[in-house]
Amino acid sequence: MSNKANRANTPALQHVTAGLWGLRDVFANLYFVRDSDLPTDSWVLIDAGLPGSGEKIQRSAEALFGQNNPPAAILLTHGHFDHVGALGHLLTVWPNAPVYAHSLEMPYLTGRSSYPPPDPTVGGAMSALSFLYPKKPINLGTRVQKLPADGTIPNLPGWRWVHTPGHTPGHVSFFREHDHVLVAGDAFVTVEAESGIATWSQRQEVNGPPAYFTPDWQHSRHSVALLAGLAPSLAATGHGIPMEGEELRQQLADLVEHFDEKAVPVRGRYVGHPAIANENGVVSVPPAASTNLPVWLVGAGLAVVGGIWLSRNRNKISGYKPRSKKEKAYSSSTIYRG
């Protein structure tokens, strides 16, 4: 995990550090955690990847922890589509696994509110594509529960959660006290998430949250400063390859000091005008910015996402099997709305 890490030299499923494994799902990450204070066969999943990735996540979990060994819990940093996409499959094959999220994230996980619209005007090919990204809520019903208010994490005693809003109102990060390991979600990331080239190469560097889906830059600034103050020894983020050591600390400190120049877009719908949300969901959003995007920029983004997906799935395409009727029914009637 040096600063020279990239897609070419980092496997999609990797051992990050003691008790922590990461899985790159096209351009988003999820994590498997086994805490030393837990029974040896007990583990927890953090986030749930993109739609269609359920079987891949299930196979990875089985490779790490054995078959017929579901997670003790599924923890969500937030509910954006690239962090909850596989829940339709996973909650079917793991019917007793509880899901936990922050109380302010509940409207987007129980079908009550859509997220603020993404902003394709902030720059970069991945941003230009963001008008296509799902933003409607999912409905987990009673399967999702609020994280305990005291900062503890069920089934993960060595860790605590930290409220890090900005990217979403109820965004949280997870912190292991004894060695300062941080699972940051999208509070900050280790790739330039807006760039198609950087997303393709996974060139490793600390950046602010994905700008196209961040509707509150003031809260985001405070969240990054809060996480930097924890002095993480390692950061595993929702996008990009995990970073550690002095390189991480220096780049994170630089991001805090120069947040407006390095993270906040020069222009954009939410620059200076955040979306407003409460416990019931989105209350108001500012007017949309001009969307005079070059056609080539949208095409570049499509090419990047398509190329990454094909490179990771080309060996499976010919052997693709449709989802079971049970999973299709669960996904359509219980998980997705709208």
Image (spheres, rainbow, N blue to C red):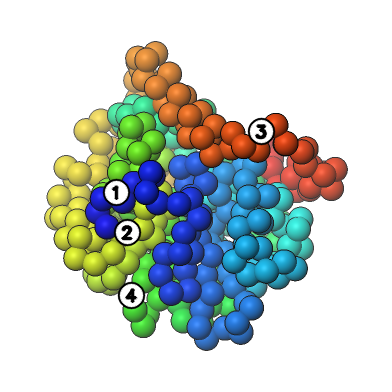
Real-space Cα separation, disc 2 to disc 3, in angstroms: 31 Å
Q: Is 73 situated left or right of 174 in this image? A: right
> Disc 2 or 1, which lies upstream in sequence?
2
Residue type marked 2: Met
Examine the rendered structure and indicate whether residue 2 appears above or below residue 157.
above
Q: Say which residue label 3 marks.
A: 317
Q: Are marks 2 and 1 in contact (CB under 8 Å)?
A: yes
> Disc 3 or 1, which lies upstream in sequence?
1
Q: Say which residue label 4 marks.
A: 180
Q: Say which element carries label 1.
A: loop
Q: Say which element carries label 2.
A: loop
- Quarter of the image with the C terminus is top right
Examine the rendered structure and indicate whether residue 164 appears above or below residue 276.
below
Q: Say which residue label 1 marks.
A: 204
Q: Are marks 3 and 1 in contact (CB under 8 Å)?
A: no
Q: Say which residue label 2 marks.
A: 1
